Image: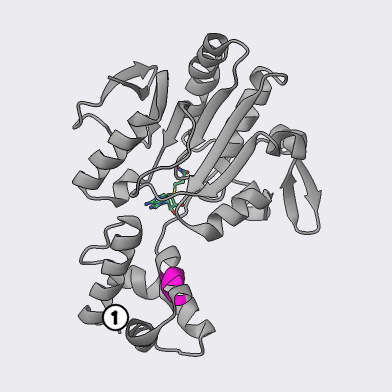
Amino acid sequence: MTIDAIEFDWVADLVRRETAIVLGAGKEYLVETRLTPLAYDAGEPCVEEWVRRVRSGGTPHQRRAIVEALTTNETSWFRDGPVFDVLRDTVLPGLLSARGAAPVRLWSAAASTGQEAYSLAMLCHELDPHRRAEIIGTDVASAVVGQAAGGCYDRLAISRGLTAQQRAAYFQESARGWRIDPSLQRHVSFRTLNLARPFDGLPRMDLVLLRNVLIYFDAPTRLDVLRRVRSVMAPGGWLLLGTAESANDSDLFVPERIGAVTLYRPR
Ligand SMILES: C[S@@+](CC[C@H](N)C(=O)[O-])C[C@H]1O[C@@H](n2cnc3c(N)ncnc32)[C@H](O)[C@@H]1O
């Protein structure tokens, strides 16, 4: 049985209001699958019935759990390898030399469980272990922000995208999994931030990774997010989107191709 239209529409509306993620027709199965564990935890084997209960008298905590369960947090180390080759060979060396003694600021703007932000920290360390890089990872989902800040990864997560050398150099194995080395972790901070709302308190960013998140928004929201991202970028900064995403339908950025990778400069 799939969730009925009234409960589905209520969930889709809640998720959209809280995150701008669009759950269109055809996503009923996704909603049902993601919410099944929450319903079970609440002692209710029927998802539809549980959603109905939350809709008519649930707590803010239950509504928040629904929203976070419907974020898609797929990520891995050095995801889309050629992108990180371009960052290591061209973009980061250019930024490090242009910024002189000032810290380079990098933002992983939909950081999920932190692999993207820590991959950036590894690249910076490889390029110059003595330079100060400030890396900020943000995400709308507090559960993944907590995991990212903890910096501890299980066997499956650690196996996706790291070489054996990187694992040995940057992680310590413990009973709970592989923990990112504190010397790398101190360059990276995480916090919750909703891209669909005004950003407060962010410094000027030299490089923004806004990857694999715009695909979940509608066109006006994508444009709005791009506009606000641009407003926090330093002159000479770079924006990197996911491989299925583009900023070409805005006049905010100029695409620049390096090898097979397209990056964007603020116009
Ligand atoms: C597929 S992951 C991408 C992770 C990483 N950027 C990568 O490419 O591997 C998408 C992330 O976007 C986050 N997200 C969705 N809507 C968001 C919003 N409105 N504000 C901030 N983050 C959001 C999700 O919680 C999820 O962790």
Name the residue rendered at 43%, 42% in the picture.
Answer: 200
Q: Can the viewer see residue 147 in this picture?
A: yes
Name the residue rendered at 44%, 64% in the picture.
Answer: 68
Q: Is residue 227 above or below residue 237?
A: below
Q: Is residue 106 above or below residue 180?
A: above
In the rendered view, does 238 fall on the left or right side of 190? left
Q: Measured from the top left, where is residue 188 in percent x and y?
A: 63, 37
In the rendered view, does 161 fall on the left or right side of 212? right
Q: Is residue 150 above or below residue 102?
A: below
| Quadrant of the rendering where the N terminus is positioned | bottom left
Q: Measured from the top left, where is residue 116 in percent x and y?
A: 54, 39
Name the residue rendered at 50%, 22% in the picture.
Answer: 87
Mark 1: few, some, or many residues within 10 Å (few <14, many ≥20)? some
Residue toward you, 83 or 195: 195
**Amino acid at circle 1:** Ile
Residue 37 in the magenta stretch? The answer is no
In the rendered view, does 154 fall on the left or right side of 254? right
Q: Quadrant of residue 190?
A: top right
Q: Measured from the top left, where is residue 252 in percent x and y?
A: 25, 26
In the rendered view, does 161 fall on the left or right side of 79? right
Q: Quadrant of residue 209?
A: top left
Q: Measured from the top left, where is residue 221 in percent x and y?
A: 25, 46
Looking at the rendering, the stretch of residues picked out in magenta corresponds to 62-66
Residue lying at the far front of the rendered structure = 201
Residue beneath label 1, please?
A: 3
Per the picture, the main secondary structure of the magenta-coloured stretch is helix
Secondary structure beneath label 1: loop
Q: Can the viewer see residue 245 in this picture?
A: no
Mark count: 1
Name the residue rendered at 37%, 86% in the picture.
Answer: 57
